[in-house]
Image (cartoon, rainbow, N blue to C red):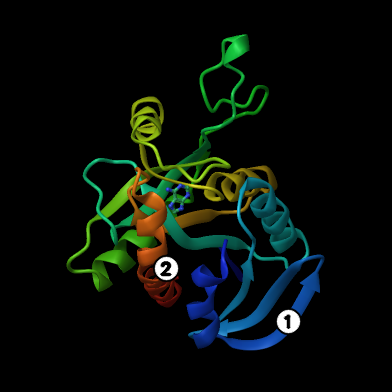
Amino acid sequence: MIGIIGAMNEEIVQLKEIMKIDETIKIGDFEFFKGEIFGKKVVLVECGIGKVNAAICSTLLIQEMKVEKVLFTGVAGGVNPEIEIGDIVISTDLMEYDFDCTAFGYKNGVIPRMESSEFKSCENLVAIANKAAKNIFENKKIFTGRIVSGDTFVASVEKIRWLREIFNAECTEMEGASVAHVCQVLKKPFVIIRSISDKANHEASVNFDEFVKLAAQNSKRLIEEILKLI
Ligand code: ADE
C-alpha cells in the first residue's frame, strides 16, 4: 500500500478524480481515501497546511493505514534562482529551516540529539521519480535536490537568499520536511514531489493564486507516472 499526501484540496483533488475509492476512513479531522490508481493500492489524504498538520497526518497514514511508502504531491515556492514557475522538484533530502537552536551553537535547521536533521528520501523512489519526470515532461526543468520547510509562506527576496545560502534549497514549502521527519523516525521510504507555483518573492501570493492549479496538475501528473513505474 502506497500513501499519497497533499496539503490542500487543490493538491489532491485531481488524483481523487482518477482514483477508484473503495473506502473512506475518518480519523479526527482527516479523511483517508483507500482504493486504487492504475491498479496500485493507495491511500490518499489531505493533511492541511503546515508542519504540525503534516506530522499528525503522516503518522496516522503509517500507523493506522499501514502504508509501506509515502509520496507527497504539491506546490512550492522556488528558491534556486534558475527555477521557473511550473518546474518540478524531486527531493533528495529535506530540512526544517525554522528549527533554530543556534543559541547553543547548532547550525540552522539542526535538531539537537537527533541522528540526522537532513531527512533523506528513498534513493529508489528518487530514481523512479526522475525516470517518470523524463518520460512525461519535455518543456520543464526537473530539479533533484533539497527541499526546505517552515511554517511561513515565504514572500521575501532576503529570505530566499538565506534559504539558498544556508541550506542550498531548490524550493520552499510548509509540509515536506515534517512528513520526511516522521518517515525517518518510523522508518518508511518516501519522496516529496513539488511543482513551482511562485518564486517566493514579493509577487508570491499573487502568483500562487494564479498558478496553484497548474502546478498541482504537474505534480499530480508526475505522481501518476511514478505509480505506473513503481
Ligand atoms: N508553497 C507554495 N509557495 C510557497 C511559498 N512561497 N512559501 C511557502 N510555501 C509555499
Image vertical order of residue 149 relative to residue 34, above or below: above
Respond yes or no on whether mark 2 lies under 8 Å from ligand 1. no
Image vertical order of residue 34 relative to residue 114, above or below: below
Toward which corner of the image does residue 48 lie, by quadrant? bottom right
**Which badge, 1 or 2, comes first in the chain's sequence?**
1
Please provide percent x and percent y for residue 16: 55, 81
Q: At 61% across and 19% down in the image, what residue appears?
A: 101
Q: Which amino acid is tagged 2?
A: Ala
| Number of residue marks | 2
User: Where, quadrant-wise, is the N terminus in this rendering?
Assistant: bottom right
Q: Which amino acid is tagged 1?
A: Thr
- Which of the numbered marks, if any, corresponds to residue 24? 1
Please provide percent x and percent y for residue 165: 34, 26
Please provide percent x and percent y for residue 44: 61, 73
Please provide percent x and percent y for residue 129: 37, 62
- Which of the numbered marks, if any, corresponds to residue 195? none
- Which of the numbered marks, if any, corresponds to residue 216? 2
Is residue 186 in view from this perspective? yes
Q: At 67% across and 78% down in the image, what residue appears?
A: 33
Under tag 2, what secondary structure?
Answer: helix
Q: Nearer the viewer, residue 120 or 58?
A: 58
Q: Nearer the viewer, residue 127 or 35?
A: 35
Q: CA distance from mark 1 to mark 2?
A: 23 Å
Q: Is residue 93 left or right of residue 113?
A: left
